[in-house]
Image: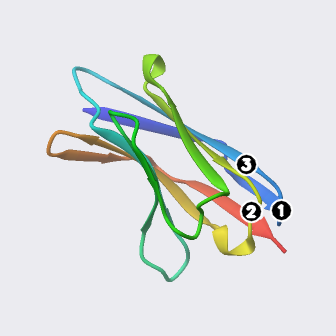
Amino acid sequence: QVQLVESGGGLVQAGGSLRLSCAASGSSFSINAMGWYRQAPGKQRELVTRISSGDSTNYADSVKGRFTISRDRAKNTVFLQMNSLKPEDTAVYYCNLESGIYRYWGQGTQVTVSS
């Protein structure tokens, strides 16, 4: 079983920055990829960004150039640096971990961007 603990959400003005963290823990798991998804009210959950075990990354078009995913392999932790935030970035952000055929989710952290 894998547990994901997220931190770093909050309220920020448009144009501001936030950094999210997600630490994975558990017994005997491998990491194929970790990433961040988000879900705004009334909308489906969508992929924001993902980093593979080989460090290849992909981003949603809406966040390219503004968000950066990174990882600390030793600590099984992934980070999401969010710059130039916009009101439309407001959502609950979920950490995701892919391990073999399994996918694990964090509890979610709220990000609110005021205009």
Quarter in which the C terminus is drawn = bottom right
Judge from the rendering whether residue 86 lies leftward or rightward of residue 41; answer left or right: right
Q: Residue flagged by tag 2: what amino acid is it?
A: Leu
Residue 55 spot, x, y in % from top left: 40, 35
Q: Residue at x 49, y 37 (%)?
A: 5
Q: Earlier in the sequence, mark 1 or mark 2?
A: 1
* Secondary structure state at the residue bearing disc 2: loop
Q: Residue at x 55, y 78 (%)?
A: 41
Between residue 110 and residue 17, name the one nearer to us.
17
Q: Earlier in the sequence, mark 3 or mark 2?
A: 3
Q: CA distance from mark 3 to mark 2?
A: 8 Å
Rendered view: 31 above or below 15: above
Q: CA distance from mark 1 to mark 2?
A: 5 Å
The residue tagged 2 is 85
Q: Residues within 10 Å of mark 1 (few under 14, many from 20)?
A: some
Residue 17 spot, x, y in % from top left: 77, 51
Q: Check residue 18 in the rendering and tell me which mark sits there, or answer none.
A: 3
Q: Check residue 15 in the rendering and tell me which mark sits there, or answer none.
A: 1
Quarter in which the N terminus is drawn = top left
Q: Residues within 10 Å of mark 3 (few under 14, many from 20)?
A: some
Q: CA distance from mark 3 to mark 1?
A: 10 Å
Depth-wise, is mark 3 or mark 1 nearer the camera? 1
- Residue 8: name its quadrant: top right
Q: Residue flagged by tag 1: what amino acid is it?
A: Gly
Rendered view: 27 above or below 89: above
User: Is there CB contact under 8 Å for labels 3 and 2?
Assistant: yes
